[in-house]
Amino acid sequence: MTLAPPRPGARVKVRGVIGEPAPREDAVPKVKGEFQYASDLWREGMLHGATLRSPYPFARIRKVDVSAAAKLPGVRAVLTQDDVPGKKTYGLMDRDDQPVLADGYVRFVGEPVAVVAADTIEQARAATKAIVLEYEVLEPTFDPIAAIQPSAAKLHPKGNVLERVRILHGDPAAKADVVVEGEYEFAMQDQAALGPEAGLAIPREDGGVTLHVATQWLHEDLDQLAPCLGLPESKVRIVLSGVGGAFGAREDTSIQIHACLLALKTRRAVRMTYGREESFFGHVHRHPARLFYAHGATKKGELVFVRATIVLDGGAYASSSSAVVANAGSFAAGPYRVPNAVVDCVGARTNNPPTGAMRGFGAVQSCFAYEAQMDKLAKACGLDAVEIRMRNGLVEGDAIITSQPLVGSAPIAEIVRRCASLPLPETAAHRDQSELPGGHANVTRGEGVVRGVGYAVGFKNVCYSNGFDDFATARVRLFADAEGPLARVHTAAAEVGQGINTVQLQIARTELGIERVELETADTNVGSAGSSSASRQTWMTGHAVLQACREVRQELVRRAEREGLTLDRTDLADLLDRPIEKTVTYRHQDTEKRRPDGQSRGHVAFMFAAHRAVVDVDVETGLVKVVQVATAQDVGKAINPLGVIGQIEGGIAQGVGLAVMEELIVEKGRIRNASFTDYLIPTILDMPPVIADVIEHPHPDGPYGAKGVGEAPTISSTAAVVAAIRAATNRDLERVPVRPDDIVFGTSSRSGWRIAPGDDPRRAVRG
Amino acid sequence: MSTHDLRFTLNGERREVTVPADRLLIDVLRDDCGATGTKLGCAVGVCGACSVLVDGELQSACLLPAVFVEGRSITTVEGLAKHGELNALQEAFIRDGGFQCGICTPGQLIAATALIAAHPEPSDGDIREWMMGNLCRCTGYYGIERAIKSAANV
């Protein structure tokens, strides 16, 4: 028997159901300062952990001597690789990739070499400085294209090619009347979550350990952690602590294994919290990339082919490079009808800091390049930015370059049209200095200021792809107490700020028709919910909660029928003399593994957004003021409109940041700006007004039609801002972020490699 | 290093701590007083997560040596709700989407409290210039701006 969801208001009006702008479930403790973030955790007698990190990008460790450090006051443990009781390596997608602590080599500046636990954090830090290390410095490789050439020195036993995806679609030799080319550079962005990496590990009586931690994926941490600790998973429990933002940076482990090792060694609770500088060295960043593109079209501007070679710098360890490479390749042609495509996409291992997941992973890098190409093509064909996108935009049933047809709405033309029809800002009168590029730095009075408008469209997969067994589990328990029926929902979904907790409550209220719903703390005592990434939690955990609630309701119906009652007219508490508990594991429909030619139905669903940016550029100083960002995004169904708007606005902020200011400066493998004074993220003064048109075309497979929301705002907003700067300056601007000298002098930033778009970058030629 | 006996009030309660001269207020609040609502964000005074009021004046607790608060009155996020009741600003931050992860929120609320004390009817420019010292990575600041406006009834 299937049940339709109860109509809210059929009996008693239930508040906080889907579609209502719902306040956050964690709102009150957050505004009172009572919400416990991982860095706030405290336990009587706890020790403090600190990490010794490599000063070299590539070196052999000749000698480690911890004896002096271990004798310092307050020091309870000093651990190196030899002290790891179980598996010596871990990794998000390759468990044999990254040493828990350096294994005789260090491969990036900041690689953990040893960890210390001491009574105070000051003592722990002092002890890391007393560890004696002798290094033999080796020749590092920083250029990702050099790293993947056959002659390159091997930086790791597994080689320097982390992943390669080659996509062949249609005729690889197709010819076109109009061809435009470009080489693009994408610099390293940081997630810059304001909450540092932190956790508290507490040893258990039974020899196990409980870890409270800020993470995106509890069960993935468990799966990596337990083998390294030499413990069965049953002896390790991981509990989600308060998470101060994630954006991809918490998908890899940071303190998790180290804190547990120290707790098990000392038999004491150990807290580890990175400071801001250490945070920049202690988490993965967004992949920098070099992208070589050629687009061919008819004279009317209809796409004939896209050829692209993309090299992503994965840094020293694999992290999620394989997924990032797969995405960059899969979405390399954009949300357009492209009959013929050749894409070669490689992730390179170098001695730069490791890179991995960040909001829109892979799709953001490609979008910057393919949208620049679309504008070049528009110019060559005499079209404007809106026309060329509407003419080529995917519609339902069209296939992307992996031959996967789109199910559900693919409203590219619609989102571009609706975005373009949103009101433009008033022409600048510049009454106030703060409205000019440079603001109160007072560098212009408007004489060299030129306005530009630019467009971009992006798309990306929702959920995990390419045959990954993607699932989410929810346990729902319905019972009655003195106040009536109460439901408790237990999942392992990581609430990182995105709002999944509120979504779970809304779904449970909608399905059960009661207001009193509570969430259990997310932990590993319930089945995995998968990661809070790939915009997947509303879809995955949302579906799991929905189905578990429907099973609970079916049991209610059965109980009502047995009593000869009609559920709609019965006080639920009368049916709950004993609780009802249902656990459901939801799996989305199977996706195909990638075939050698890159063709497959690899994704479960897609999300789409269009952005229009308006900028004022001072062409004399190269300073940019973003004046407005407009967006139209198809979210399928806004389960919580307040949360959707928050994701759209916040995602655009990160896209604007990448366009004009956010760059980790890495020189000879060393991050030079590991602080918020030097790694700039937008302040309130940097953010322009955002106008959002939220479109709800339900997806047939999403919960209530919902698609993912969180990544789309970041994917194409950067490209739109850069397009607007190009429009204002007539510069090519093939690098992001755009720097003042790029605008003033038209600096080009070439890789120094000649690669024909579509060719294998492992056979590149210098020059 | 010299040590100092400090007396101050924290959200209306008298506190006494003995600290070395170089101990920062953020550590006294979080570690000595257990008031972890105030966050350490950047440790260099640029992100605003550690914003507190010292005798009503907006300060960064990550920069301020604790000895400076001798005899003074400190307000942190824990002191905003009275008898458990949220104030107008706290309510507005919830209603208008003023946060997501919320780790910057204690600092945002304290900075906004100081803003409204200085400018009871702040203009858009007042809000943006005053709040520029408080970073947020989740919201893009729009919800924060909406919340401050609605709490100040402008």
Image (spheres, rainbow, N blue to C red):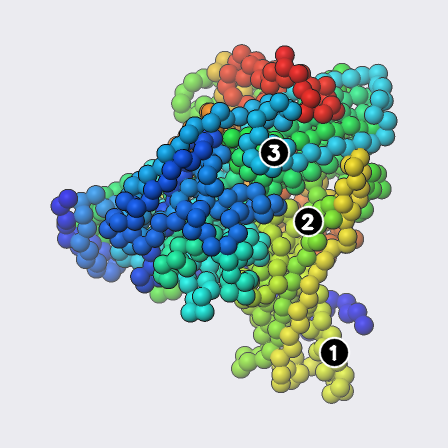
Q: What is the total number of numbered labels drawn onto the structure image? A: 3
Q: Residue A296 at what x, y percent from top left?
A: 80, 21
Q: Residue A637 at what x, y percent from top left?
A: 70, 52
Q: Secondary structure at mark 1?
A: helix
- Check the picture and name the quadrant holding the N terminus of chain A: bottom right
Q: Earlier in the sequence, mark 1 or mark 2?
A: 2
- Check the picture and name the quadrant holding the C terminus of chain A: top right
Q: Residue A650 at what x, y percent from top left?
A: 55, 42
Mark carried by residue A92: none
Q: Secondary structure at mark 3?
A: loop
Mark carried by residue A557: 1
> Does residue A677 appear in the picture of this structure?
yes
Please give the residue where the numbered disc 3 appears in the rendered image: A159
The amino acid beneath tag 3 is Gly
Q: Determine whether A754 is above or below A658 in the image.
A: above
- Residue A714: image quadrant is top right
Residue depicted at 74% across the width and 55% down the height: A588
Residue depicted at 75% across the width and 80% down the height: A558
Q: Are marks 3 and 2 in contact (CB under 8 Å)?
A: no
Please give the residue where the numbered disc 2 appears in the rendered image: A463
Q: Earlier in the sequence, mark 3 or mark 1?
A: 3
Chain ID at mark 2 = A
The amino acid beneath tag 2 is Cys
Q: Which residue is the extreme one toward the bottom?
A: A563
**Residue A727 appears left or right of B146:** right
Q: Residue A235 at what x, y percent from top left?
A: 51, 65
Of badges 3 and 1, the one in the foreground is 3
